[in-house]
Image: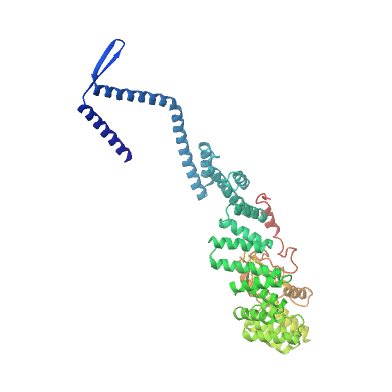
């Protein structure tokens, strides 16, 4: 539009100019070399304009002649780039569809037509194609070459992070996630990985700072942020309860307010309050938690609030706790344990039997065996209760990613995921005889069975269902979680994977670090 307007203005100016010349006629004379040329002013002006136009045309022609090679080169370069980008687009589509052959062919074509140093997508397609082909070493090499380019550094960190996770190398994955978080703290995958890594290292203050930054950037919604903050504060309180009970109390009480259903938070808060001498407030915290979700850890902490209490005092506290949830199995078990310690075998037996009728599980029958033995019952009766314990339903336990732990932890020992532990009945874990062995109680029953005082018995019904669901192959490693107990490895986690699994992991590729 602007060009049309400019053209019209020029035409109008020329028309006005020639009109003015017609209204003001005149002549001119040119004396050159003894010759005199005369004419009108209008002819002179037209001749001047024609001369200027001719000079401009000649100049343009000369410039076009000298620029022709560059223009021809740019023409062919543009065509090559267009072909290269078409190949690049086709390669990305093929890689997304899993067509490794077409993706590799398009990668080679794009690399020939486009300078990979100027177009990061060529290297990215090369890495993606290598991953589809299973050539992870080549993919890592491409990602490492992309680290030097500021435009592709974050993408390289992402690729190397995923490769480290695939190889099961948490230290390398954490390294790349931390580097990515420094480059772009708003990236969710990097922030989440660093958050889990700092939690696993015990840097709870650092993890809380990262969580707050993620919440402020709206990478985590407020509900999830509150839950994760409660988990981190609980872990911090557990660590500080012995050496800094004041700070542990502050952290644990905040965790309780953020996640009232988080049992370890209530236990940590109560322990900190008890160490500070505030028995009343600590008991209130446990009682409130017991109202909504009775848990053995709550009962243990409540009954043994003061180390110097007599068995009668503990019995009194157990009764007070049981009155809050009188018909709950955990209330009956807690009261039965306190009665057993106090020598009230009748009450202990009544409560344990009532609990076994409602939930016939392993710990209840082991408790009945303890009562029978403490009361001086026959060895046959004790063996009967132990046999029923071996075949009974399992007790709830802290479970994360198939791993059963004695105590709650903020992160999973398998995946490193934050807030992974759940209080639930775990999947089975069997020994060669088919008996379910877990923790101190299971080891005690197993020891008696091994000594010949108790027959192994049949596998429990729940385990038969689990075996059927897993294919019924009877393999101790099929769909079986690792059980963590006091007899585990030095790290506090379960036994190493079976030899075939370890061999598979070691042959899957080189470790990044």
Q: Quadrant of residue 398?
A: bottom right
The answer to whether residue 485 is seen in the rendering is yes
Q: Is residue 246 left or right of residue 121?
A: right
- Relative to residue 370, is residue 122 depicted above or below? above
Q: Residue at image x 23%, y 29%? A: 20
**Nearer to me, 22 or 305:** 22
Q: Quadrant of residue 203?
A: bottom right
Tally the numbered discs.
0
Q: Is residue 242 left or right of residue 419?
A: right
User: Where in the figure is residue 26, as x and y percent of width and height?
Assistant: 22, 22
Q: Residue at image x 77%, y 76%? A: 448
Looking at the image, which residue sits at the far top? 34
Q: Quadrant of residue 62?
A: top left
Q: What colour scheme does the image use?
A: rainbow
- Relative to residue 123, is residue 462 depicted above or below? below
Q: Residue at image x 24%, y 32%? A: 16
User: Where in the figure is residue 188, as x and y percent of width and height?
Assistant: 56, 57
- Relative to residue 50, is residue 165 depicted above or below? below
User: Where in the figure is residue 444, as x and y percent of width and height?
Assistant: 75, 75
Work out which quarter of the rendered image holds the N terminus and state it.
Answer: top left
**Nearer to me, 47 or 88:** 47
Q: Is residue 88 left or right of residue 382?
A: left
The answer to whether residue 459 is seen in the rendering is no
User: Where in the figure is residue 337, as x and y percent of width and height?
Assistant: 72, 83
């Amino acid at each position: 539009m602007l060009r049309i307007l400019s053209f019209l203005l020029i035409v109008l100016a020329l028309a006005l100019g020639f009109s003015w010349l017609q209204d003001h006629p005149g002549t001119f004379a040119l004396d050159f070399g003894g010759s005199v040329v005369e004419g009108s002013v209008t002819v002179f002006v037209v001749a001047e304009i024609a001369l200027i136009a001719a000079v401009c045309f000649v100049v343009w022609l000369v410039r076009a002649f000298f620029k022709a090679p560059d223009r021809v080169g740019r023409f062919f370069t543009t065509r090559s780039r267009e072909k290269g980008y078409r190949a690049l687009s086709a390669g990305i589509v093929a890689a997304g569809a899993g067509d490794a052959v077409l993706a590799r062919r398009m990668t080679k074509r794009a690399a020939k037509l486009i300078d990979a140093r100027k177009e990061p997508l060529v290297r990215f397609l090369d890495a993606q194609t290598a991953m589809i082909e299973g050539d992870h070493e080549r993919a890592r090499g491409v990602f490492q070459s992309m680290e030097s380019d500021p435009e592709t550094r974050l993408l390289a960190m992402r690729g190397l992070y995923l490769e480290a996770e695939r190889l099961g190398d948490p230290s390398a994955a954490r390294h790349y996630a931390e580097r990515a978080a420094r480059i772009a703290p708003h990236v969710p995958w990097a922030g989440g990985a660093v958050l889990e890594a700092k939690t696993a290292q015990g840097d709870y203050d650092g993890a809380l700072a990262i969580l707050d930054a993620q919440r402020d950037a709206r990478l985590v919604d407020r509900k999830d942020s509150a839950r994760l903050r409660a988990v981190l504060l609980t872990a911090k309180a557990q660590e500080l309860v012995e050496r800094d009970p004041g700070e542990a109390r502050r952290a644990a009480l905040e965790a309780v307010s953020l996640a009232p259903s988080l049992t370890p938070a209530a236990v940590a808060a109560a322990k900190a309050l008890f160490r500070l001498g505030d028995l009343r407030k600590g008991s209130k915290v446990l009682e409130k938690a017991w109202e909504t979700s009775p848990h053995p850890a709550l009962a243990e902490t409540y009954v043994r609030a003061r180390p110097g209490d007599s068995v009668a005092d503990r019995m009194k506290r157990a009764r007070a706790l049981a009155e809050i949830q009188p018909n709950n199995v955990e209330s009956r078990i807690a009261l039965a344990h306190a009665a057993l310690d106090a020598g009230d075998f009748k009450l202990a037996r009544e409560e344990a039997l009532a609990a076994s009728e409602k939930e016939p599980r392993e710990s209840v029958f082991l408790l009945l065996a303890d009562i029978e033995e403490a009361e001086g019952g026959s060895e046959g009766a004790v063996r009967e209760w132990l046999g029923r314990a071996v075949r009974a339903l399992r007790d709830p336990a802290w479970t994360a990613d198939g791993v059963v732990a004695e105590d709650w932890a903020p992160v999973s020992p398998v995946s490193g995921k934050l807030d992974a532990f759940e209080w639930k009945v775990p999947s089975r874990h069997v020994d060669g005889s088919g008996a379910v062995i877990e923790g101190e109680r299971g080891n005690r029953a197993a020891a008696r069975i091994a000594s010949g005082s108790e027959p192994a018995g049949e596998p429990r019904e729940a385990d038969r269902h689990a075996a059927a669901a897993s294919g019924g192959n009877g393999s101790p490693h099929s769909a079986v979680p690792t059980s963590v107990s006091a007899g585990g490895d030095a790290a506090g986690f379960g036994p190493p994977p079976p030899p075939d699994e370890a061999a598979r992991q070691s042959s899957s590729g080189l470790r990044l670090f």
